Image: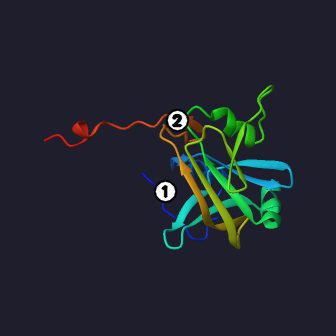
Amino acid sequence: MLPTPSRNRPIDPRDFRRTLGRFTSGVTVVTTADGDHIHGMTANGFLSVSLDPPLVLVSLGRQSRMAALLTRTRRYGVSVLADDQQVHSRHFAGRPVPGFTPEFDHLDGLPYLRGCLSRIGCDVVEIHPAGDHLLFLGRVTALAHEDGEPLVFFTGAYRALYAETGDQLFTH
């Protein structure tokens, strides 16, 4: 049974994280180039906003290095990770793996992780403050994708995506 909600009761940040952790998300690495330096950050706060014009949004902590960089560079790339790229996700989430060196491909002047499923290049068109985060609305300027299985995240852990075949889904 769900507890009775109270509009006056503050939301506990741990409960908020545990509850929202039940929403399965894909895993992305947001990248930008600052001169000759490539910077990346794992982010699952990513979504499609509009088809016409093509817009996406990435949500970054106000205090993150990436938020400061995107405010300056005004461009970002999104690499949608494949299921064999957990090490990439961890690396760009601040948990580097000894001996691991990520490889990048470039499209339209932006870096993307080699082996990712999708590459989405964006110019920042708006930045909106939202609590302890900044929302970077990006106009899509470049796209590319590959076939493969996605890396997904649920309840604080990486998971495998499972789907039944069409025959199994629609039986009489």
Label disc, if present, on residue 159 of the rendered structure: 2
Give me the residue at 55% from left, 35% from top: 83
User: Which secondary structure, mark 1?
Assistant: loop
Disc 1 residue type?
A: Pro
Label disc, if present, on residue 3 of the rendered structure: 1
Dot 1, crowdedness within 10 Å: few (<14), some or many (≥20)? few
Q: Quadrant of residue 97?
A: top right
Q: Nearer the viewer, residue 143 or 134?
A: 143
- In the picture shown, does residue 131 fall above or below 33? below
Label disc, if present, on residue 171 of the rendered structure: none
Callout in the foreground (1, 2): 2
Q: Looking at the image, which residue sits at the far left?
A: 172
Give residue 123's position: percent from left, percent from top: 68, 66
Give me the residue at 42% from left, 51% from top: 1
| Side of 96 where 168 appears, left or right | left
Disc 2 residue type?
A: Arg
Give me the residue at 68% from left, 37% from top: 88
- In the picture shown, does residue 102 fall above or below 36? above
Give residue 118's position: percent from left, percent from top: 56, 48
Q: Nearer the viewer, residue 57 or 103?
A: 103
Give me the residue at 86% from left, 50% from top: 36
User: Which secondary structure, mark 2?
Assistant: strand
Q: CA distance from mark 1 to mark 2?
A: 29 Å
User: In which quadrant will I find the C terminus?
Assistant: top left
Q: Quadrant of residue 71?
A: bottom right
Q: Earlier in the sequence, mark 1 or mark 2?
A: 1
